[in-house]
Image (cartoon, coloured by chain):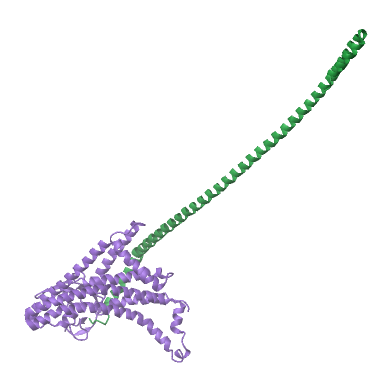
Chain colours: A green, B purple
Amino acid sequence: MGFVTPDYGTIFWMLIIFGIVLFILKKFAWGPILKALKDREKSISDALNSAEKARKDVAGLKASNDQIITEARKEKDLILKEARDIKDKIVADAKNLANAEAQKSIEYARQQINAEKMAAINDIKKQVAELSVMIAEKVIRKELENTKDQEILVESLLKDLKLK
Amino acid sequence: MTPLIRSFLLFIFTILLSAGISRANETETAGKEGGNTEIFNPGKFVIEHVSDSYEWHIATFGETQVSVPLPIILYSSGKGLNFFMSSKFHHGKEAYKNFRIEHEGKNEGKIVELNETGEVTGLPINLSITKTVAGIFVSVIVLLLIFLNIAKAAKRRTGQAPQGMQNLFEPVILFVRDDIAKPAIGEKRFEKFMPFLLTVFFFILINNLLGLVPIFPFGANVTGNIGVTLVLALFTFLVTTFNTNKEYWKEIYNPEVPWWLKFPIPLMPIVELTGVITKPFVLMIRLFANMLAGHLIVTVFVSLIFIFAVKLGVGGGLGVSVISVLFSVFMLLLDVLVSFIQAYVFTLLSALYFGMASPEHH
């Protein structure tokens, strides 16, 4: 058998054997092996992707947490400021109201006092008139006894009597 | 992974070391005995070691040859189908059922049909299981055992880390996929060709490596047989041709070259068509020549021992044997490298041809 002349017997058997081996391996070996490799690669890359996604989610969560805290802080400040304003306003209102009320009370008191005073004056005037009548009566009676004395008395009486 | 690979390498090295030594021993015995009766013929010795034969020779002790007989299958118009074991030929010395192995002349090494007077009447159709075919059977069994097991493991352990044999071969499969098929064929189409590329790669690799193991049932020179490489190249050619697109044929029959290269003499189409044939032809020759050369060189180094033993006596032969064994071991180690490289090159070039079979329009 020469080296460079292919032997047809060898070619015949090789064709059959290689064909069968190719078929068997293709059907029963390479399919499952390549599929397993692909599946493993896919699961690894999926795992990596999901880890990356989880990492991003956590980062996003942290950022949004920070934002929420900042907003809450702002809101708190706002609420506090509003409360302070309301407090100031209430205090100021109360003060104003109290002032007005006091003014009103004072005014009323003054009016009362004036009214009382007028009444008192009127009363005094009436009493004075009555007293004067009484005095005049007494004077008249005394005059009857002594005119001169009577005059002196009236004089002194009138002197004492001074309207306020 | 590393301890496994390390032990695998250690295993290979051990085999190779024993390969060199046992080859030397085997031939030394044959040489010594042969030296008494006939002159040692290194050319014949080397050629016999790498050629195909009808029996699987293991060793020779004096006049007794130890060999495994292989089935002979012959068909001739005169005698119909004949099936018998090669032991009937008594190592090629006798004729059986009027069939004989020719040892010289133009039919040297072939089985010829004889008539009653012993004259050669013709060549029967010979589909015998020769040593090469038997070697293919052995390596195919190894191949199937390995990869059907891995497939089983891959199915059983879906989604888990690979283990054992699976772990050993998965990087190689990934290498074929990611470094040969993907770049050569392209992301979109490579998957279709993966079964063929993987089968070719591992078929060549396992045959190359088993060819280096000199112990029966390994050591047949399979990938160094041109018939085997011819079939491998033929498969590549067929797969290429059945996966072509219009662009591929246009570039062959009507390439974009100046018109005078196509008319009146279709120079470029002829060149391109030649290329279609030379591509698989080169694949065939490259693998065959590389593997044959590796086997030849190792046997040549071994036969040096007997040349010197004949010239300088037994002492000279022993002295040279040290150097020869060292060289043989070195060459066998080199052959391991060549085994991987040739499997890689064959697969890579096949993948490149598949990639070129459906080019994008440019």
Q: Quadrant of residue A84?
A: top right
Q: Quadrant of the N terminus of chain B?
A: bottom left
Asked if residue B2 is positioned above or below residue B277 in the image, the reply reads: above
Q: Is residue A150 left or right of residue B300?
A: right
Q: Could you say where residue A76 lies in the image, as x and y percent from the top left?
A: 56, 45
> Which of the two residues, B131 or B349, is positioned nearer the viewer here?
B349
> Which of the two residues, B3 or B286, is positioned nearer the viewer here?
B3
Q: Could you say where residue B139 lies in the image, as x and y percent from the top left?
A: 26, 69
Q: Quadrant of residue B192?
A: bottom left
In this view, the residue farthest toward the top is A145
Q: How many marks?
A: 0
In this view, the residue farthest toward the bottom is B264
**Residue at x 42% of width, y 56% of height:** A51
Asked if residue B270 is positioned above or below residue B14 in the image, the reply reads: below
Observer able to see residue B308: yes
**Residue at x 59% of width, y 46% of height:** A78
> Which of the two residues, B283 or A142, is positioned nearer the viewer here?
A142
Q: Quadrant of residue A82?
A: top right
Q: Is residue A115 left or right of residue A150?
A: left
Observer able to see residue B54: no
Q: Could you say where residue B96 lies in the image, as x and y percent from the top left?
A: 17, 77
Q: Could you say where residue B105 lies in the image, as x and y percent from the top left?
A: 19, 86
**Residue at x 80% of width, y 24% of height:** A117
